[in-house]
Amino acid sequence: MNPQRSSSRPASSTRLPDGVVAREVERHRGNVATRSRNAVAEEVPVAFVYNGRPHAVMMATPADFEDFALGFSLSEGIIDNPAQCMKVETVEALNGIELRIEIPSEKAAALEERVRELTGRTGCGLCGAQTLDAAVRHPPPVAEVPEVREDGLLRVLGEIQNLQVINAATGAVHAAAWVDLDGRVALLREDVGRHNALDKLIGAMQRAGSDPRRGFLLVTSRASYEMVMKAATVGIGFLAAISAPTALAIALAKAANLTLVGFARADGYSVYTHPHRLLSIAGEVLAQG
């Protein structure tokens, strides 16, 4: 038996958030099918071009481009400070977006050398690297890391979902949030890619003058080694992830003096490295025991 079909009115004309588009959908529930317009997350190629030379292309949500350009440049070690990101121009291309970024000539030369070294290797491995040290950058240990109270972490875990505007509309994106020590979200960025969301947040933090020693990072994804590496590179020493960490992420966090929390939920969490910075009753009991 074919499902019953009916027509519903178009979705409200309320403006959708940046990075969200409306698309036709046929919904099937039980024995009824309805046609409507659905909010869907956009995903477009975003090319990073430094001093006229293409470097990388990311599939990303088309929003917060200046934050993205600055955050990526910092977290990937292409530049050392925000002032070295001298200009960002967003150009719409035929098949996506180009971020044309100007950096000092010596930084552009170092980036070119890095790319040349990778493409010249013949061994198998990540990005052409032949050893773990070549494949994974090891940022210096974070020098100053705050203590975070359990009640602050639990507070933001109870509020984060309501602050994700794009995800509320689409259910398809990750978020990275900068949280103050009272558990209040100061900045939040969303993207279809978890690394992109973090890069956008890092850029937003730099533009807002946020102090990485005065808060912590919460991500709604798993904590891969790239997330730990990017956070530590810009001086963030406390990272909480709603999902699981990887073994390499734990090893990097330990070496980088970064407290890594995984499976962060309202009913509990797991602390994988440097647990003394998360102040909780359970932690005090463990210490006494």
Image: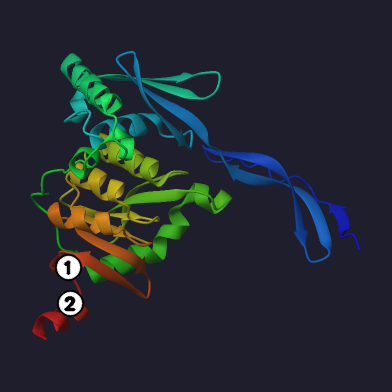
State the SS at label 1. helix
Question: Does 254 appear above or below 189?
Answer: below
> Is residue 17 among what the camera can see?
yes
Residue at (27%, 24%) from the top-left corner? 120
Residue 110 on image: x %, y %: 18, 21
Quarter residue 261 falls in: bottom left
Q: Nearer the viewer, residue 262 or 135?
A: 135
Q: Nearer the viewer, residue 200 or 111?
A: 111
Quadrant for the N terminus in the image: bottom right
Q: Nearer the viewer, residue 285 or 253?
A: 253
**Disc nearer the start of the sequence (2/1):** 1
Quadrant for the C terminus in the image: bottom left
Residue 211 on image: x %, y %: 18, 45
User: Neighbour class for label 1 at 10 Å: few (<14), some, many (≥20)?
Assistant: some
Residue 275: numbered disc: 1
Determine which residue is flagged by label 2: 283
Question: Does 232 appear above or below 42?
Answer: below
Q: Amino acid at mark 2?
A: Gly
Residue at (48%, 37%) from the top-left corner? 61
